[in-house]
Amino acid sequence: DGGITQSPKYLFRKEGQNVTLSCEQNLNHDAMYWYRQDPGQGLRLIYYSQIVNDFQKGDIAEGYSVSREKKESFPLTVTSAQKNPTAFYLCASTTGGRNTIYFGEGSWLTVV
Amino acid sequence: DAKTTQPPSMDCAEGRAANLPCNHSTISGNEYVYWYRQIHSQGPQYIIHGLKNNETNEMASLIITEDRKSSTLILPHATLRDTAVYYCIVRVAPQTGTASKLTFGTGTRLQVTL
């Protein structure tokens, strides 16, 4: 079945360590997105990419980095510069036109 | 993409219709209205979308006003499993190979009760 796979589902890290969240899609979608969600809050856009080797900052990109070396993969690195990284992270993808946006099941990151 | 405004919360009795409003007064002519819902911090689930005509599918109906400045999502017979946060977003339908900046608001928390 086609879809978006995020891993890991749950991740614990010590403060000061970088961590990379994986997002893979087999939908042949061009555009991919990363969102952050804090408890009881809406989704905030971190980064998005429209094509391989190209990406743009969203509304809260500071302390995060991404890469888009392959069409199907869009990993997110939470760096030590991110002051409050504990959150729920969601990856999404879509094609052009008026097609719907598909989401992964999310990754919970806890930094202690 | 245009900004949307939704009430923070709503209640609905099970079996009754749930009508969730969304204001998007700055919507452009080429922007679609999309509705998603999120249950228990899972990935948001697509519900329905439309441009200017009313739309209906197996999950819900979407009513868009003639001036397109607001819309209403209707769940005709709400059940307890419809308890979720509902997001209304507007987006341009980009050409293939391009991406639009998708911005979600805080949504409406719908509580369906017995």
Image (tube, helix red, strand yellow):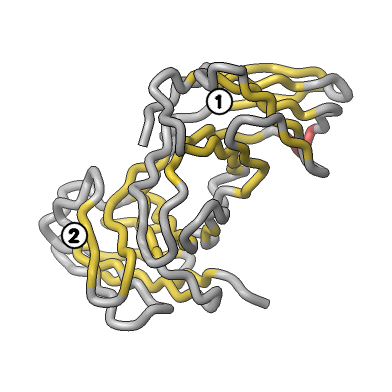
Q: Nearer the viewer, residue A3 or B102?
A: B102
B107 lies above or below A44: above
Mark 2 belongs to which subunit? Answer: A
Q: Identify which amino acid the numbered label 1 is placed on.
A: Thr
Q: Residue at x 56, y 56 (%)?
A: A99
Q: Residue at x 46, y 37 (%)?
A: B31
Q: Nearer the viewer, residue A39 or B45?
A: B45
Q: Position of residue A77 (x, y in %)?
A: 24, 67
Q: Position of residue A18 (x, y in %)?
A: 19, 69
Q: Quadrant of the N terminus of chain B?
A: top left
The reply, left or right, for residue A48 in relation to residue A91 is left
Please indicate, yes or no, whether residue B8 appears anywhere in the rendered image: no
Mark linked to residue B108: 1
Spot the residue most to the left.
Answer: A81
Spot the residue most to the front.
Answer: B29
Q: Quadrant of the C terminus of chain B?
A: top right
Neighbourhood count class around disc 2 (C-alpha, 10 Å): few under 14, some 14–19, many 20 upward? some
Mark linked to residue A15: 2
B22 lies above or below A26: above
Task: Determine whether the residue tagged by mark 1 lies in a helix, strand or loop.
Answer: strand
Mark 1 belongs to which subunit? Answer: B
